[in-house]
Image: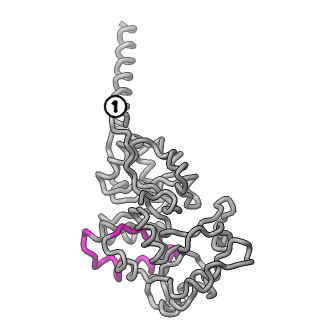
Amino acid sequence: MKIKGKKKTISIVILLLILIWLNNTSIFYSTKSDYKFLAHRGLAQTFDVSQVEWDTNTAAIIHEPEHPYLENTIPSMQAAFDLGADVVELDVQLTKDNKLAVFHDFTLEYRTEGTGNVSDYTMAELKKLDVGYGYTADEGKTYPFRGKGVGMMPELSEVFSAFPDKELLIHIKDGNIKTYEVLWNDYLNTMTEDRLAQITVYGDNEGIRYLREQSPSLRLLSKDMMKSALLKYVLIGFTGYIPKELHNMELHLPLKYARFLWGWPVKFVRRMESVNTRVVIVAGDGKWSEGFDTLESLEDIPKGYSGYVWTNRIDRVGRK
């Protein structure tokens, strides 16, 4: 009797394992990949990420320029969309007169001839700066974009006007809760539901919590938010259940870790899409915005993947 009972237990365990596998495998789906591209800061000048620390002036270490575009400008965003980007990411900071300037660095000195922070100036004053002033590929011997970026720092409403039907990912860079309040009250709050569905915001935990209080459906992301939600999914996702914390989000997943998620790649992406969550894979460990920037790197994308791919070089990998 003991032997029969043991065999029955083993059979039940095996059956459960088979059911879990069937519930999470992607092998029965098409292997045709239909992924989309997310262009980081539009079409930007790139650099060696191995040289980067948190305070590195990346404009001072760019590669020899291969195109004329500067990050976070409307021409660079337009170029990215023209080259096949489905989403463009941009950075915003609060100005002295409570506008949202599209600019990445914590100090103006890195890319412009200005000094101090974005918050020290009005938007009109920032418009006078040259956002191409500080770029150099040869340790300061030459500055190929100096004089070419005057007046090109956009205000967020200009981006919305230029791309009224495009998907945008807004990164709030300054960590100021007021920036989130201005973003919601002066920019997002008056949007239609259809337009708001094309906008995603990521930033620090406090600010993202504020935006969630304003809108239950706006796609949002913070690091802590993502870690907490994915931990719950790792614990119970094998059942197919999607924790509510994973609803209405954006996930930026290093590919080397994403492959361990239940249902990866096809079922996982479909599950997330069903709760208005966008899946974006990044290269490396996700620390320095490494992207899939060469045709060779695209070969690492799993068969059947239909989410988004982070790239810094849409000109190299885009489909147009």
Question: In this picture, is 27 found above or below 45?
Answer: above
Q: Is 168 inside the magenta-drawn segment? A: yes
In the image: residue 48, left or right of residue 101: right
Q: Is 270 inside the magenta-drawn segment? A: no
Q: Nearer the viewer, residue 91 or 17?
A: 91
Question: In this picture, is 79 found above or below 255?
Answer: below
Dot 1: what SS? helix
Observer able to see residue 144: yes
State which quadrant residue 68 falls in: bottom right
Q: Nearer the viewer, residue 16 or 115?
A: 115
Which residues make up the magenta segment? 166-194
Q: Quadrant of the N terminus?
A: top left
Q: Quadrant of the C terminus?
A: bottom left
Q: How is the image coloured?
A: one colour
In the image: residue 63, left or right of residue 164: right
In the image: residue 270, left or right of residue 148: left
Observer able to see residue 207: no
Residue 155, percent from left and from top: 44, 83
- Seen at 35% across and 42% down, the residue is 267
State which quadrant residue 150 falls in: bottom right
Q: Which residue is mark 1?
A: 22
Residue 183, percent from left and from top: 39, 78
- Seen at 65% across and 68% down, the residue is 64
- Seen at 39% across and 8% down, the residue is 3
Q: Nearer the viewer, residue 82 or 252?
A: 82
